[in-house]
Image (tube, grey):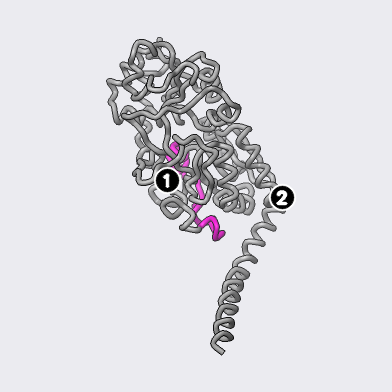
Amino acid sequence: MIRKVLLLSVIMGFSLIATAEAASNPDWDKTVGAAKKEGKVTIYTTSGPGQLAALRKGFEKAFGLEIEFLSGRGAELREKLFRERQSGMYLTDLFMMGASGMLIDFKPAGVFDPIKSLLVTPEALDPKAWWKGSPIYLDKEQTYVIGFCFFPQPPILANTDLIKPGDVKSHADLLQPRWKGKMVINDPTTTGAGQEWYQMVSKALGGEFMRKLAKQEPAVARDLRLQTEWVARGKYALLLGPQKAAVGELMAAGAPVAYLTTSDVNWATCNPGTMGVINRPAHPNAVKVFVNWLLGREGQTIYSKSFMIQSARLDVPTDHLDPQLIRRHGVNYINATLEDFALERAVIEKEARAIFGPEARQ
């Protein structure tokens, strides 16, 4: 009799779970069905075609939906969006790019829908699956801009044929005469990884360090792939403020490059694993499906392997990553992508332009 009661309880328990799941499925199925009628989701992004191809393939396989990507520099894409909206055109759904541009330009302009309200699948919402219990909300309201990756940011990329272990242990080592004319900086005068590098290093070491570094005559470049290729080919030995997506492509191809961490300045970042949903999206159901898929284990695994960065999900493998891009247990990382840091960028950009801008280098 006891066994029958226990068995009945178990069955009823499963039945309640199944009923709850069934109750949630019709709404989700309706959303997916409406998304398939829309046919695609449109995303503006600063990422390159290599990474995006894997996302497109994975999402199409999962839902039969297309991803239409438009790639470019962050500032150009933001200008494009504002021009479209001024003309009454609402052509896109989602921005995937550096967080600071979204927080500084888009959020005050009221461009975003609350992305938090779109998260509905148990997998995307599972607190046990996420570092710190959820995707990382980067805006002060914890509503609009999500960071779904989080990893230490190595400040320097080196050509391993030109740099020996121990050659560069700190940023102070960059001031040695041997590195004069042998460095390239990811342009710190514009939004991106180079500006993040400038902000973190200058906050730690001061403007005087940056002025001394400028006397080392580093090249300053905006083309993310080109600056990385320069280091891979040995034109320059070091790249300061490397962008992970561009580096990941060359690392996967076996280029002689490696990240360097330093003893004096280290931090962690969500970029380029950040996104915000544009209000009045062109494909409201498809973007909802995409956001939930991307924040699930499958979407995050594809993203992590394509971009070679660590997801903020705890159930995504890391065996494909450079060890220096993996969070270390017990370390309290400062998140350089939070809105407070983004709001400092106008001052940081002005300082960087005075030291590394075109006029300063003439």
Q: Is residue 199 visible?
A: yes
Instruction: In the rendered structure, find residue 362 and report the number of the disc placed on it.
Output: none
Residue positioned 28% across, 26% down in the render: 206
Q: Is residue 299 above or below residue 202?
A: below
| Count of numbered badges drawn on the protein | 2
Amino acid type, label 1: Leu
> Which residue is more in the foreground, 50 or 72?
50
Q: Is residue 347 visible?
A: no
Amino acid type, label 2: Gly
Q: Is residue 15 above or below residue 64?
A: below
Q: Which residues, given as a range, are shown in magenta?
A: 99-125
Instruction: In the rendered structure, find residue 64 and report the number of the disc placed on it.
Output: 2
Q: Position of residue 139 (x, y in %)?
A: 41, 46
Q: Position of residue 327 (x, y in %)?
A: 42, 42
Separation of marks 1 and 2 at Cα, in angstroms: 31 Å
> Which residue is more in the foreground, 77 or 221?
221
Q: Is residue 117 above or below residue 9?
A: above
Instruction: In the rendered structure, find residue 138 and report the number of the disc placed on it.
Output: 1
Q: Is residue 125 above or below residue 204?
A: below
Residue positioned 37% across, 36% down in the render: 267
> Which residue is more in the foreground, 294 or 346?
294
Q: Position of residue 350 (x, y in %)?
A: 36, 25
User: Was residue 121 drawn as part of the magenta stretch in this picture?
Assistant: yes
User: Was residue 109 drawn as part of the magenta stretch in this picture?
Assistant: yes
What secondary structure is marked by label 2?
A: loop
Q: Position of residue 358 (x, y in %)?
A: 42, 15
Residue 85 vs residue 269: left or right? right
- Which quadrant holds the N terminus? bottom right
- Which quadrant holds the C terminus? top left
